[in-house]
Image (spheres, coloured by chain):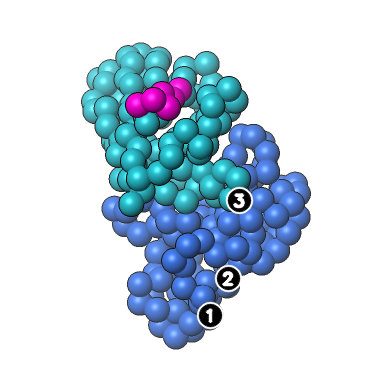
Chain colours: A cyan, B blue
Amino acid sequence: EVQLVESGGGLVQPGGSLRLSCAASGFTFSSYEMNWVRQAPGKGLEWVSYISSSGSTIYYADSVKGRFTISRDNAKNSLYLQMNSLRAEDTAVYYCARDLTIFGHGLDYWGQGTLVTVSS
Amino acid sequence: EIVLTQSPATLSLSPGERATLSCRASQSVSSYLAWYQQKPGQAPRLLIYDASNRATGIPARFSGSGSGTDFTLTISSLEPEDFAVYYCQQRSNWPNTFGQGTKLEIK
């Protein structure tokens, strides 16, 4: 069974940093592209970042470019999101999501999300 | 950045009725469009990928159509569990973008 479990969320002050993790199991992690998607309280979905299966190709939303860094450790079956210079508008539930990759264009498995609150 | 506009914002229907949800892109996304369903307190669920392909385990009452800039998600006969928020997402260009969502509510 495919499982994605996020961790690392919490309360952080504006300007602070946080590192989110996503532990993957039930599939060959190294074969799949991965994404981070966030959802502010009561709002819609916002795509945040993408990383290819090898980690060689990365994309970011303009809203986080230069502040967030996506990475992965295929040996540990883990995806990460390093978030620096956090702002109030970064407050959201952050989901990691598996890409269909060679099977199509869509995010077929999602974690349960981890809440990041940026507030003083 | 490609902007996706979903309509209507809210759709009020009864169980058994047919639902038609629209997603329009500001420029062509070919067939690289996905649809998701999200219920309160839950993660989104993939329904349709590449405009018209049902994801694994998705009932046949869900169907997707369209290409280029205009896409439709159709639910042929609404079940009580279908009332939720639906999002489209384009996977054609970076950054990927989502529509603002359509809330499907019980009439």
Q: Chain of mark 1?
A: B
Check the image and report above or below for A44 versus B40.
Answer: above
Q: In the rendered image, which quarter is residue A75 located in?
A: top left
Q: Residues within 10 Å of mark 3 (few under 14, many from 20)?
A: some
**Distance from label 1 to label 3 (Cα)?**
24 Å
| Residue A24: % across, % down | 35, 38
Asked if disc 2 and disc 3 are in contact, CB closer than 8 Å, the reply is: no
Which amino acid, by three-letter code, is at mark 2?
Ser
A75 inside magenta stretch:
yes
Pointer 1: what residue? Answer: B76
| Quadrant for the N terminus of chain B in the image | top right
Asked if disc 2 and disc 1 are in contact, CB closer than 8 Å, the reply is: yes
Q: In the rendered image, which quarter is residue A117 located in?
A: top left
| Residue A9: % across, % down | 27, 29
B9 inside magenta stretch:
no
Q: Seen in the image, is B67 located left or right of residue A37?
A: right
Which amino acid, by three-letter code, is at mark 3?
Gly
Q: Chain of mark 3?
A: A
Pointer 3: what residue? Answer: A104
User: Which region of the structure is painted magenta?
Assistant: A71-76
Q: In the rendered image, which quarter is residue B82 located in?
A: bottom left
Does any portion of residue B16 appear in the rendered image?
Answer: yes
In percent of the image, x 44 and y 66: which residue is there?
Answer: B57
Q: Seen in the image, is B66 located left or right of residue B6?
A: right
Check the image and report above or below for A16 versus B90.
Answer: above
